[in-house]
C-alpha cells in the first residue's frame, strides 16, 4: 500500500489517532518505542523537526517523509523493520562479504537491521562521493537512515523510472544509456554491484537517473557479485525492451561494465 503524502504533524500521536487503519498498523509496526528513541535523537540534533506521512511500506523497510524548521530541505527517513520473517532471504547478501564478515548478528533481528542500515548508508556515501546521482546520505542511527528526499517540490516525490512519462524514443534511449553508464561507474569507481537494480530502484529527478535502495549492494569480491550483476543487467534490459527500444546483448553489457 502506498500513501502519497498524507502529512501527519505529530509523529507520536499519528500512530494512535490516525483514522486510516492500514496506516496505523504500519506506524505501529515500525515506530516502536526503541525506534522512536532513535528518531527523537535525530530530532533533538536538529536534523529533522518532524516525521510526516509514510511514502512507502516495503517488505524490509518503511520510508517516511520528514522535514526541518532549520532548513527548507525535505528528507526521506528509511526505517528498517525488525520482524523476523524477511531475514532469511537477506543473509546471502551479507554472508561472505568482507566488510561485514565479523558480524555475528545473523540470529539477532535487531542487530541484523542495524547492519543493513549501515550497509545502505555506507554504500550511499560511496555513490554520493563518487558523483553518482543518488539521495545525499544525511544521518544514521541504528536502523533509522535519513537521506535527501528526491522531490518535484511541495512534497511530491520524483517518479520512479517505472512511472516516468517518456516524451519520445530518444528519451528512452537516453535513460537506457545513462543507466548503463552509472552501472559501469558504480562497478569501476565505487566497486559496487547494485544487486537489486530495476525501474523500481531508480528515480528520474531533475532530468537525471538517481540510484536508490543500495542496502544489498555488494563489492565485486562477493562470491555472488557477478551473478547479481547479470541479474541487474537483465532487469534493466527487460524494462527497456518493453519500452520498444533495441537493447545490447547482456554479454556485451557485462564486458562494458566490468572491463
Ligand atoms: P524498499 O524497496 O526496500 O522498500 P527503497 O529504498 O526502494 O526501499 O524505498 C522504497 C520507495 O520509497 C522507493 O521506491 C521510492 O518510491 C521511495 N523513496 C525511497 N527513498 C527515496 C528518496 N530518497 N526520495 C524519494 N523517494 C524515495
Ligand atoms: Mn526498493
Image (cartoon, grey):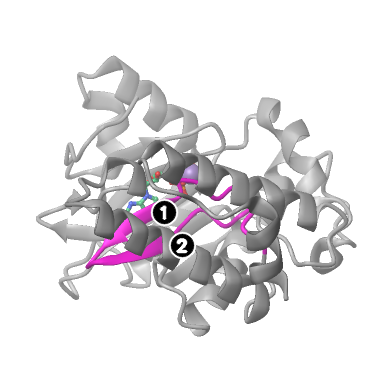
Is residue 74 in view from this perspective? Answer: yes
* Label number found at residue 179: 2
Image coordinates for residue 212, horizontal then vertical, percent: 46, 57
Magenta part of the protein: which range? 193-215
Secondary structure of the residue carrying tag 1 is strand
Q: Is residue 106 left or right of residue 157?
A: right
Q: Is residue 20 magenta?
A: no
- In which quarter of the view is residue 205 placed? bottom left
Give residue 256's mark.
none
**Image quarter (top left, top right, bottom left or bottom right) of the C terminus:** bottom right
**Circle nearer the viewer, 1 or 2:** 2
Outermost residue on the top side: it is: 21
Q: CA distance from mark 1 to mark 2?
A: 9 Å
| In the image, residue 201 lies in the stretch drawn in magenta | yes
Mark 1 or mark 2: whose residue is earlier in sequence: 2
Q: Is mark 1 within 8 Å of ligand 1?
A: no
Residue 166 x, y percent position in the rendering: 22, 49
Question: For the point 61% across and 58% down, which residue is it?
Answer: 194
In terms of depth relative to the viewer, which is nearer, 105 or 58?
Answer: 58
Disc 2 is placed on an element classified as: helix
**Residue at position x 16%, y 41% from top?**
7
Which is nearer the eye, 103 or 166? 166
Q: Is residue 168 left or right of residue 57?
A: left
Badge 1 crowding class, 10 Å Cα cut-off, few under 14, some 14 to 19, many 20 or more, is many
- The residue at 54%/62% (across/down) is 141
What residue is pinned by disc 1?
A: 202
Label 1 close to label 2 by CB (< 8 Å): yes
**Secondary structure mainly formed by the magenta segment:** loop
Can you give x and y, in whole percent of width and height, for residue 90 in the image?
73, 40
Name the residue at the left extreme: 154
Amino acid at each position: 500500500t502506498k500513501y502519497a503524502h498524507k502529512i501527519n504533524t505529530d509523529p507520536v500521536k499519528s500512530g494512535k489517532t490516525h483514522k486510516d487503519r492500514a496506516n496505523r498498523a504500519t506506524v505501529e509496526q515500525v515506530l516502536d518505542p526503541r525506534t522512536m528513541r532513535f528518531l527523537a535523537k535525530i530530532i533533538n540534533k536538529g536534523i529533522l523537526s518532524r516525521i510526516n506521512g509514510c511514502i512507502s511500506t516495503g517488505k524490509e523497510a518503511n520510508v517516511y517523509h520528514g522535514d526541518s524548521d532549520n532548513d527548507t530541505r525535505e528528507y526521506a527517513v528509511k526505517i528498517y523493520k525488525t520482524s523476523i520473517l524477511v531475514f532469511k532471504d537477506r543473509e546471502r547478501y551479507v554472508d561472505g562479504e568482507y566488510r561485514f564478515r565479523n558480524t555475528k548478528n545473523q540470529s539477532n533481528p535487531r542487530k541484523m537491521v542495524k547492519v543493513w542500515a549501515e550497509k545502505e548508508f555506507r554504500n550511499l556515501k560511496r555513490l554520493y562521493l563518487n558523483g553518482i546521482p543518488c539521495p545525499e546520505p544525511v544521518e544514521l542511527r541504528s536502523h533509522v537512515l535519513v537521506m535527501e528526499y528526491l522531490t518535484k517540490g511541495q512534497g511530491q516525490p520524483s517518479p520512479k523510472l517505472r512511472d516516468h512519462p517518456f516524451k519520445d524514443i530518444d528519451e528512452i534511449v537516453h535513460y537506457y544509456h545513462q543507466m548503463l553508464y552509472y552501472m559501469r561507474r558504480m562497478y569501476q569507481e565505487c566497486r559496487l554491484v547494485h544487486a537489486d537494480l530495476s525501474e523500481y530502484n531508480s528515480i528520474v529527478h531533475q532530468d537525471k537517473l538517481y540510484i536508490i535502495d543500495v542496502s544489498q549492494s555488494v563489492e565485486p569480491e562477493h562470491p555472488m557479485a557477478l551473478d547479481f550483476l547479470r541479474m541487474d543487467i537483465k532487469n534493466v534490459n527487460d524494462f527497456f525492451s518493453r519500452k520498444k527500444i533495441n537493447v545490447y546483448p547482456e554479454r556485451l553489457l557485462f564486458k562494458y561494465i566490468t572491463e
